[in-house]
Amino acid sequence: MKKSYKIDVDCVNCARKMEDAANKTPGVKSAVVNFMALKMNVEFEDGADAKSVMADVLKACRRVESDCEIFGI
């Protein structure tokens, strides 16, 4: 399953850190952050619960960039 989320991030470097953190989160098959569009596209592993995985993604992203936000979780 693939989903797209609106994000709030301040700089390109922070967006890259968010992408790296998301890709290391269990349940995420792949994540791509587009800083210009302020979007994160996430493909989930088969059988993963998107809502709980995204809660973990947000926690991981906030560890690397404390003021980031992911909307629509």
Image (cartoon, helix red, strand yellow):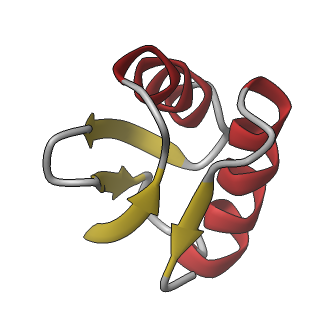
- Which quadrant holds the C terminus? bottom right
- Residue 1 seen: no
Give percent across and percent down for residue 55: 74, 66
Image point 15% across, 42% down: which residue? 36
Image point 25% across, 38% down: which residue? 35
Image point 42% across, 27% down: which residue? 11
Give percent across and percent down for residue 54: 62, 64
In the figure, 47 relative to 68: above or below? below
- The tally of labels here is 0
Give percent across and percent down for residue 72: 48, 85
- Which quadrant holds the N terminus? bottom left
Give the left or right position of residue 55, taking residue 43 as reference. right
Q: Nearer the viewer, residue 27 or 56?
A: 56
Quadrant location of residue 52? bottom right
Give percent across and percent down for residue 7: 43, 60
Image point 55% across, 36% down: which residue? 22
> Which residue occupies the extreme left position in the image?
37
Give the left or right position of residue 58, taking residue 12 as reference. right
Quadrant location of residue 56? bottom right
> Which residue occupies the extreme top position in the image?
13
Q: Nearer the viewer, residue 27 or 20?
A: 20
Q: Nearer the viewer, residue 21 or 71?
A: 71
In the figure, 64 relative to 59: above or below? above
Q: Nearer the viewer, residue 66 or 27?
A: 66
In the figure, 65 relative to 38: above or below? above
> Which residue occupies the extreme bottom position in the image?
72
Give the left or right position of residue 18, taking residue 4 as reference. right
